[in-house]
Amino acid sequence: MITPLTPLDWKRRAIKYYPDKIAVIDDHKEFTYREFGERTDRLAVALHEAGIREGDHVAVMLPNTHYMLESFYGISQLGAVMVPLNYRISASDMEYIINHSDAKMLIVDAEFAAPIEEIIDNLSLENIILVPVEGQNSSLKSIDYEIFLNHASSATPPEVEIDENQLLTINYTSGTTSRPKGVMQTHRSNYINAADFMYHLNVKHDDVYLHTLPMFHANGWGGVWAITAAGATHVCLRKVDPPKILDLFEQKGITLLCGAPTVINMLVNDPKAKEAKITTSPRMATAGSPPAAALIQKAQEILGLDMMHVYGLTETSPFILYCEWKKAFDSKSMDDQASIKARQGIELAFNGETKVIRPDGEEVNWDGEELGEIVTRGNVVMKGYYKDPVKTEEAIKDGWFHTGDLAVTHPDGYIEIRDRAKDLIISGGENISSTEVEGVLYKHQDVLEVAVIAVPDEKWGEIPKAIIVLQPDAKVMEQDIIDYCRNNMAHFKAPKMVEFVDDLPKTATGKLQKFRLREMHWGSAKKVN
């Protein structure tokens, strides 16, 4: 007997065995698994009565609230396809994504309705469901979310036979120099990724998971499914607010969370961090950009977080590597432990095969030195880019998905990213890893955040430049930073220029947008790509 692999089955299981367990905490609201199940079922019925059928696409633009969680389950159990939207992108990108995705309906939070109001005349939506927010008004012709649910004629949604290879979500990547691409994820790829999430992040029934990571980003890395699978508790967080997060650790007994290195940086540098009394020793998975070893060390020493490094892309659902911790590492110094935890690591148990290759397709030597590109194949790789066979063929060659990330493989098989192909700095014929330089700078006591990019140079072609956000009250000069780097790394790798700024451009998930920094120096030249 074969049953389809779909994360929807975990909702059924959670309701069966944990009906009275608190499933979702959202500020002052709480829902048991039974109540959560009833709400998602009513949403499915309401959507069906509004004309949504199997295969239809529904766009959703919501922060990390119980409404967002309900949308994942309510839409998907109809066999419909959810299109999670990043609410921080431009109105023009929203217009492109909604139209390109063929969405028939939009569920939107009132706080983020303004850009939709700008483009509404250019959208071919049949209905808009508005989640009300106190103090936020919208001129959109819409239906209130709760009224929409309450008008459902039944609490029993129609039965739909799910094929594990059918689309579950279309997740759009952030556009840089081109339009966003719609990554087609299936029920199977989400199921396998969530299984990896559960196993490798050690998710248990008694876990209390804080949704610091935007759920729209690769479906919360799989957390929207994995936490339900274990019958654990989802704690919603409308926006990243470091003091509130530090308070929630104790108030709600948070045991697990995920976030980009930028979120870690915000937490360890918050004034409350040194006074925080965190007794739950939360586990925190980080990904999105290579974390500096110094940052991991601060998180462990200042907040007592048990840091876990994972790696992946939206195109891979997203996990394909994790930094497995071995007992042998416990005897190493804190410095060495942090350096190991900064590696992307090895394949997860269920996702498939990942390796680092040369341009000819052969695997690089396991010496920690030879640079190559990370490629992967297996259960979590996307079905392709929606309505874009050309880009799909460019990304998936000879059965392997090409990530564009440059890395080395250590003798123990652990993969470590040295840079994105587009971020590698080639100065006078020498390759310089921007992440390596950033890792050194994060050890400087006056550096809060840093991005290292290539800038044009007449003699060397390009040279490294460090763009730095300083710690409050720091008094450090450009030459001090350059000297520090020259004293801690090969001279040719040290930044030749330093600029101090108030902040760095980031995505909604806290990932540095280096292309925006490069645009100021290269315009439309190659380094913007």
Image (spheres, rainbow, N blue to C red):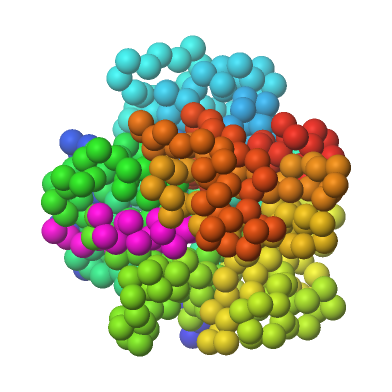
Camera-nearest residue between 476 and 177: 476
Tally the marks: 0
Q: Residue at x 66, y 77 (%)?
A: 369
Give percent across and percent down for residue 187.
Answer: 54, 63
Specify whether 376 is left or right of 51: right
Q: Is residue 71 above or below residue 391?
A: above
Question: Do we see residue 15 in this rendering?
Answer: no
Camera-nearest residue between 471 and 156: 471
Q: Residue at x 29, y 51 (%)?
A: 210
| 165 inside magenta stretch | no
Specify whether 409 is left or right of 324: right
Please identify the quarter of the rendering in which residue 15 is found. bottom left
Q: Residue at x 47, y 66 (%)?
A: 342
Give percent across and percent down for residue 152.
Answer: 37, 36
Give percent across and percent down for residue 385.
Answer: 72, 54
Q: Residue at x 43, y 50 (%)?
A: 444
| 295 inside magenta stretch | yes
Q: Is residue 7 above or below residue 39?
A: below
Q: Which span of residues is magenta-colored? A: 279-302
Q: Is residue 117 above or below residue 150?
A: above
Question: Do we see residue 427 in this rendering?
Answer: yes
Please identify the quarter of the rendering in which residue 119 is found. top right
Camera-nearest residue between 484 and 332: 484
Give percent across and percent down for residue 238.
Answer: 34, 36
